[in-house]
Amino acid sequence: MFMFSIFTSLLIYFSGIYVFSSKRKHLLMVLLSLEYIVLSLFMLVIVFLIEFDFDYFFPIIFLVFSVCEGALGLSILVSMIRSHGNDFFNSFVLSLC
């Protein structure tokens, strides 16, 4: 069961990395792939903590930081859509910032 859980979380991690590196047209797809990666890392941490019988304080802190990362990404997405009208990376020039 331990090896299956590790294999599953690593498969999810690498599929998230693939989507992050290949689908860079929309900001929403990039943010969703980052959340997918964070979820797989959380699963991996939980599996290791259960297997080696450690405390569960680190996953709570990890979840707090991942929620903050998600909220920050959504606020950037909303501000880009309000200022540029869409979430395409090609529609705005980053050198003007």
Image (cartoon, rainbow, N blue to C red):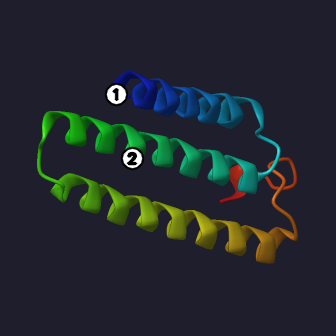
> Quick check: 64 above or below 38?
below
| Mark 1 vs mark 2, CA separation in Å | 15 Å
Please name the residue shown 80% across and 49% down the image: 89
Q: Position of residue 86 (x, y in %)?
A: 86, 65
Q: Position of residue 92 (x, y in %)?
A: 81, 56
> Quick check: 12 above or below 4?
below
Q: Decide which of 40, 50 is in the foreground and name it.
A: 50
Please name the residue shown 34% across and 66% down the image: 64
Dot 1 crowding, Cα within 10 Å, few <14, some 14–19, many 20+:
few
Image mark count: 2
> Quick check: 71 above or below 58?
below
Q: Position of residue 10 (x, y in %)?
A: 48, 27
Choose the circle earlier in sequence order: 1 or 2: 1
Dot 2 crowding, Cα within 10 Å, few <14, some 14–19, many 20+:
some
Left or right for 94, reference 6? right
Q: Which residue is mark 2?
A: 42
Q: Position of residue 94 (x, y in %)?
A: 70, 51
Q: Decide which of 7, 33 is in the foreground and name it.
A: 7
Q: Which residue is mark 1?
A: 2
Q: Decide which of 57, 7 is in the foreground and name it.
A: 7
Q: Secondary structure at mark 2?
A: helix
The kind of residue tagged 2 is: Phe
Please name the residue shown 42% across and 59% down the image: 66
**Snapshot quadrant of residue 84:** bottom right
Q: Decide which of 95, 70 is in the foreground and name it.
A: 70
Q: Secondary structure at mark 1?
A: helix
